[in-house]
Amino acid sequence: MTQKEIGELRRHFKPDRAAVERIYGCYVNTNREIVAYIDEPVSLMPGGEQEMYLALLKKSLSGGLGRNLIDIVFSTSQVADSDEHRLLMELRGSRLRNADAREALYRRIIDSFDPETNYVILLCFDAYDVPKRGSDGGDGDSENVFSYILCAVCPTKDIKQELQFFPGDNEFHSTASGQVITPTSFGFLFPAFDGRTVNIYNALFYTRDASDSHADVISGLFNVDLPMSAGEQREAFEGALGQALGEECSFEVVRAVNERLASQLSEHRETKAPEPLVLTASDVGDMLTDLGVSQGAVESFKSLCGEALGEGASIIPGNVIDEKRLVVKADELTISSAQEEGFRLETRVIDGKKYILVPVGARVEINGVDALV
């Protein structure tokens, strides 16, 4: 799927557009016991409640591809005959009306998820009449119907009794304590919406925390090899860069690599390309060569990337650097600047001591107070 296709689904998934008839789900405690089931017709829900349920489910379609949104690819043999794919197809084909299939999905999630708090599993079925794109870019008649299931897993938290103002009484009264649902932690879409049509060979998995891909849950649900999380990619990239360059891993080289990757991300975004920017280890190797790094160190970097990320693996710059900020840490000191301003930082050796120099104007601010320099 592309970011544009995800955006199209998100725009459709609203109370006045989506064809969601019922919300299904269950409430699970930390002992992996189902405490209660959810089976509610959307049409009978108060408007605010309906919007809140749909907002939690819609969250499973948010974030960046390769970062919060992970492409799940089924093998041909899985699609032909496997328990995991058969279950997903039954859930979609029955429009989630098969209670046994719903229970089987709940158990797959419950058995593979080890949470710190109670949580809620939410499910819905939707059918999207995909409009045909006209030559002028506008929408025409429906081209096909994309029917899919959407799942969201949301932690709960305790709320305490508090005083709340009730306008009708013009008084404050205590509110009840209990558990409330918090934003979606992870979820998935099946099947994928590729080329604006159905692709049963793929699903899309969402994780709120890009450093945690919920590997056990993905394995339990889909039984596929898991791509590295954004956090793991970043650690692997940083480790390969530091180990390969050794003494050549200077402040200037690392800063320049960050600066160039950030610049490429900015240029890629301006093209409005639907796919995220993807580089190879060789692409980054060419960048290092251009920065004066020795060929031996460059080859070592490419080799280490292959070991850590997999041979021929893609490097997504948005996962391995912070496009907006450059953070420099030295002992107990931390310097944070906009990425594009990083070139202002310099390193010097003065009287035998190493320094990072930060050029400033006539004044600086310390804890909100202007101070003379």
Image (tube, grey):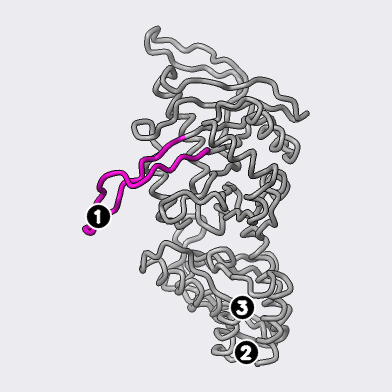
Image height of 343 relative to 19, above or below: below
Name which of mark 3 and mark 1 comes first in the sequence. Answer: 1
Three-letter code, disc 3: Ala
- Name the residue beneath numbered marker 3: 281
Please name the residue shown 61% across and 36% down the image.
Answer: 153
Disc 3 to disc 2, C-alpha distance: 14 Å
Image height of 215 relative to 90, above or below: below
Question: Which one is in front in this view, the residue at disc 3 or the one at disc 2?
Answer: 3
Q: Is residue 145 magenta?
A: yes
Name which of mark 1 and mark 2 comes first in the sequence. Answer: 1
Q: Which residues are magenta?
A: 126-149
Identify the main secondary structure in magenta: strand
- Name the residue beneath numbered marker 2: 293
Disc 3 to disc 1, C-alpha distance: 40 Å
Three-letter code, disc 1: Gly
Q: Which class describes the residues within 10 Å of circle 1: few (<14), some (14-19), or many (20+)?
A: few
Please name the residue shown 68% across and 56% down the image.
Answer: 226
Which of the numbered marks, if any, corresponds to residue 247? none
Image height of 159 relative to 170, above or below: below
- Name the residue beneath numbered marker 1: 134
Query: What element does badge 2 sit on?
Result: loop
Viewer-closest of 352 and 312: 312
Q: Is residue 169 left or right of residue 343?
A: left
Three-letter code, disc 2: Val
Identity of the residue furthest to the left in this view: 136
Question: Which one is in front in this view, the residue at disc 3 or the one at disc 1?
Answer: 1
The percent position of residue 195, horizontal first and vertical second, equals: 42, 56
Picture quadrant of residue 302: bottom right
The percent position of residue 143, horizontal first and vertical second, equals: 33, 47
Q: Which class describes the residues within 10 Å of circle 3: few (<14), some (14-19), or many (20+)?
A: many
